[in-house]
Image (cartoon, rainbow, N blue to C red):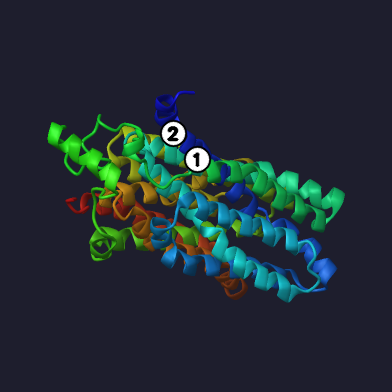
Amino acid sequence: MSSSRLSAARPWLVFVGCCVLSLVGFGMVINTPGLYYAVLSHDLGVTRAQVALATTIMNGVGALTMLVAGRVMRRVDSRLLISGCVVVCSVVFFLGSYFTSLWQFYVAFVVLGVAYVIPVSLAPSVLLSNWFEEKVGMVMGIALGLSGIGGTIFNPIVSSWISDFGWRTSYRLTALVLAVCILPFSLLVLKFLPDASRGEYAYGHGRKVAPVSTAATSTDSVSERKGAETAATTGDLEGMSAHDAYRTLTFVLLAVISVLLQFTSGLVQHVSGYEQTRGLSLTQGALVVSGIMLGAALGKASIGMALDRFRVELVLAAYSLVGLAGWLLMMLIASPGPATVFGFLAGLGQGVVLVAVPWLVRRCFGPRDYAEIFSGVQVAGTMALALSATVHGAVFDMAGTYLPSLLSAVVFFAIAAVGMPAAYRLRPSLKK
């Protein structure tokens, strides 16, 4: 492939790399730890809650890491940074296969909490924002949507590894898959920004004035195109500084909604137990959870495309209301088939926090300090997610029912249906 063709294909290679980060990284690091709870509890002679605490530690440390992750991404070559983090994750899983005490897992998951954030939680959104001026919603939706598909694929695979070979071998295989699948892309493809001096441009460059337009009738003048080319070369990208963005009402609204909806996301872990309290079997309850995961995968992919094509405020409100309807109907009707459908609707609403939030950060504040601003929004939401499973469990212990938690999900999606469009309409004007 000639150098010019390679440069033209670079955005799509970055897209494929981000898909792999989401599919394999999220699918294995985030979606499979629960599969080890029972076997580790038995082998180490501890409770499942004690084993699960390692995951809570990982998510809590991950939330703290978010505070600095955006700034680190801007200062360190992303290919080396992402690759280094993936290597650390692989080493943690490999060494974990030799652990014999619970405290070793706690220490290891502290390290994992630091290492997974940049390649799994931050890099896909940040890199796609930098490499695409058009079709941002579509590529974000597809790439981030693959995280749910990754869970669907790797949960049965890892379960079979644990059953057939034991958890120690499963940890080693996880380490191998992470390294083999991700490192070729992270080392060779995942650059932070296009380099115009080498003929590299974001997809759609020249067909739009800037990556983010703040007016419906912006013009594409020669001087603006030259300015965009200069920005691509020097890194002086259009948009608002993180310092200024943190002071806007739009940022506050996005951060609050991220907290509320990530807190609701943690309720998914309790859905199977909730359905069992209403007379469904374990298998039927698990089917409802599968409905949520399938809905989340479709919701993340479709909302990105919808945001690119239709009126933003209507898309945000519609998906929030669909999520609201799903949780509300799960409260009212307890029948296996309908409950699975309602779980699917609740999953569709997940696209609001998992794709619409990073898309809105890009659209409202521009690419200049995107990594820092997005990590600022994410940190509170990630902390809420880390605490939510425990809080929802405590609510059940006190109330004897999950209904208060489901009611909170309905209320939070109602807030999102109003707050997300408001955040977009209140977006600041962007100046270089």
Question: Residue at horizontal 39%, vertical 59%?
Answer: 75
Q: Which residue is mark 1?
A: 189
Q: Position of residue 377 (x, y in %)?
A: 38, 60
Q: Is residue 12 above or below residue 314?
A: above
Q: Position of residue 150 (x, y in %)?
A: 61, 43
Which of the two labelled residues, at mark 1 and mark 2, occupies the earlier sequence position?
Answer: 2
Amino acid type assigned to the residue bearing label 2 in the image? Arg
Q: Which residue is mark 2?
A: 10
Q: Residues within 10 Å of mark 2 (few under 14, many from 20)?
A: many
Instruction: Tell me if residue 336 can be seen.
Output: no
Quarter of the rendering containing residue 203: top left
Helix, strand, or loop for circle 1? loop
Amino acid type assigned to the residue bearing label 1 in the image? Val
Instruction: Tell me if residue 399 can be seen.
Output: yes
Q: Looking at the image, which is closer to me, 96 or 46?
A: 96
Q: Looking at the image, which is closer to me, 146 or 294?
A: 146
Q: Are marks 1 and 2 in contact (CB under 8 Å)?
A: yes
Left or right: residue 102 versus residue 333 is right
Q: Position of residue 404 (x, y in %)?
A: 51, 65
Left or right: residue 251 versus residue 187 is left
Helix, strand, or loop for circle 2? helix
Question: Residue at horizontal 54%, vertical 45%?
Answer: 187
What is the CA distance from the residue labelled 1 to the residue labelled 2? Answer: 8 Å
Question: Residue at horizontal 50%, vertical 52%?
Answer: 327
Left or right: residue 14 versus residue 153 is left
